[in-house]
Image (tube, rainbow, N blue to C red):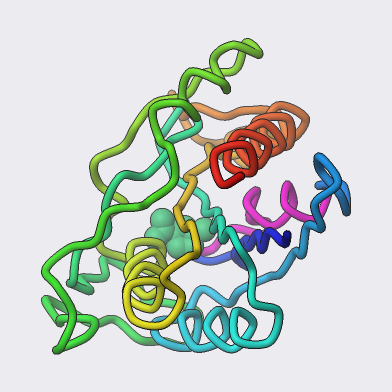
Amino acid sequence: MKVLVTGFDPFGGEKINPSFKAVKRLPDKIMDTEIVKMEIPTVFYKSIEILRSKMCEIQPDIVICVGQARGRAHISIERVAINIDDARIEDNEGNKPEDKPIFFDGENAYFSNLPIKEIVKGVKSIGIPAEISNTAGTFVCNHLLYGLMYYIHKDFKRTLGGFIHVPYLPEQVIDKKNMPSMSLENIVKALEKIIEISIRHYK
Ligand code: PCA
């Protein structure tokens, strides 16, 4: 069994992105299962293409993508991705699509097929705030989750996939007023728990 876990590079003027910082720190094996880690550029379409080619190469059983969510205090387990790009800021290659469908032949929305409620319970049980989120936004994170679930429906029917949004790290909010953050240690612990629950659910 193999789990692919991705994080994004920094974007929107930030110097770091907690998502890949945390993914990088994950162990190489969890419950005897290989964990493959990968950084994905915060760029529309390129992100999906890179993820898809990695999935073709390693044929993972579970894919968990992770991204930074400004303003959120909890680890959020995304329920759904919608077929729309509507960017508030430019991505890392200057693209700023507005009200554009991601795939013309795709559904309006796809649900994550991870056990999202079990995951929320499990993360809370280790003392870390977690919640279900019913929107991954309309920027590159929603875009990547949409692409992941689109390809799971088309070509990787046995694969479990989902998306986790994580808060800023404390060092990112030093000069931001009333902005929530979470320690890297807790984010890594939460991701380990999420992977463990997903592996157990798959088996
Ligand atoms: N967060 C952005 C894209 C990359 C990331 O880490 C988002 O929420 O769309």
Nearer to the camera, 77 or 11: 77
Asked where in the image residue 64 lies, by quadrant, the reply is bottom right
Question: Is residue 35 placed above or below 11 in the rendered structure?
Answer: above
Task: Give the quadrant of ligand 1.
Answer: bottom left
Residue 133 in the image, given as x and y percentages of width and height: 31, 37
Question: Is residue 10 placed above or below 114 in the rendered structure?
Answer: below
**Residue at image point 86% right, 46% down:** 32
100 sits to left or right of 75: left
**Residue at image point 44% right, 45% down:** 114
Residue 164 in the image, given as x and y percentages of width and height: 49, 46
Count of numbered circles in the view: 0
156 sits to left or right of 62: left
41 sits to left or right of 101: right
**Residue at image point 18% right, 71% down:** 83
The quadrant of the picture occupied by the C terminus is: top right
Q: Is residue 49 magenta?
A: no
Nearer to the camera, 197 or 86: 197
Q: Is residue 18 magenta?
A: yes
Question: Is residue 87 placed above or below 118 in the rendered structure?
Answer: below
Residue 177 in the image, given as x and y percentages of width and height: 45, 28
**Residue at image point 40% right, 72% down:** 152
Asked where in the image residue 34 lies, by quadrant, the reply is bottom right
Residue 111 in the image, given as x and y percentages of width and height: 27, 54
The quadrant of the picture occupied by the N terminus is: bottom right
Residue range corresponding to the magenta coloring:
13-25
Nearer to the camera, 107 or 82: 107
Nearer to the camera, 86 or 165: 165
